[in-house]
């Protein structure tokens, strides 16, 4: 039996001015809403917990780690993180890596965010971008 290849899925990238999708994912009231609904933004973000996530930042570095949490401002915490950066400015160039552990990535620094998951999960997660 063949297994489906897992593909990275982009999730919304936050902005510091609050106008981007992450401000809608975790709004003031949803974090304290005790009624679990399968379609609520908080429950959809919970499905991302402990998934492998690749986050790109403005200076060209990438961080691969397990998604640990996201706050109302869209800051992301990754655990067991590895940093990847280019050793030269020219492309293509070899990537240098180092282990970092637990890190916080501010929403204002993020340029991209991808999660590894199956094709079915990709379709359900894409609804995060449309909200």
Image (cartoon, rainbow, N blue to C red):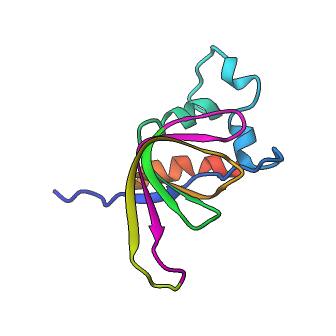
Q: Residue 41 in the image: x percent, y percent?
A: 64, 34
Decide if residue 8 is on the left or right side of residue 70.
left
Q: Is residue 34 left or right of residue 49?
A: right
Residue 22 within the magenta-colored segment of the rendering: no
Residue at image coords 43%, 81%: 93
Estimate the x, y position of residue 82 in percent, counting from the top left: 40, 53
Tell which of 121 and 115 is nearer to you: 115
Dominant SS of magenta comes to strand
Q: In which quarter of the image is the N terminus?
A: bottom left
Most extreme residue toward the left, as rendered?
1
Q: Which residue is drawn at 61% across and 30% down?
A: 42
Residue 110, position as x, y percentages in the image: 64, 55
Q: What stretch is highlighted in magenta?
A: 68-89
Is the residue 71 above or below the residue 62 in the image?
above
Q: Is residue 61 above or below residue 66?
A: below
Let me know if residue 79 is in the magenta part. Answer: yes
- Residue lying farthest top? 34
| Residue at figure coordinates x 45%, y 74% from the top left | 87
The foreground one among 8 and 95 is 95
Query: Horizontal and vertical percent for residue 24?
Result: 74, 39
Tally the marks. 0
| 42 or 84: nearer the viewer | 84
């Amino acid at each position: 039996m063949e297994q489906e290849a897992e593909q990275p899925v982009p999730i919304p990238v936050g902005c510091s001015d609050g106008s981007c999708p992450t401000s809608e994912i975790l709004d003031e009231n949803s974090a304290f809403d005790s009624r679990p609904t399968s379609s609520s933004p908080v429950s959809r973000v919970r499905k991302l917990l402990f998934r492998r996530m690749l986050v790109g930042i403005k200076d060209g570095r990438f961080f691969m780690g397990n998604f640990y949490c996201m706050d109302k401002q869209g800051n992301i915490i990754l655990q067991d993180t590895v940093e990847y950066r280019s050793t030269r400015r020219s492309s293509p160039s070899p990537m240098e890596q180092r282990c970092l552990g637990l890190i916080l990535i501010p929403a204002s620094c993020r340029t991209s965010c991808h999660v590894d998951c199956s094709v079915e999960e990709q379709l359900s997660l894409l609804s995060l971008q449309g909200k």
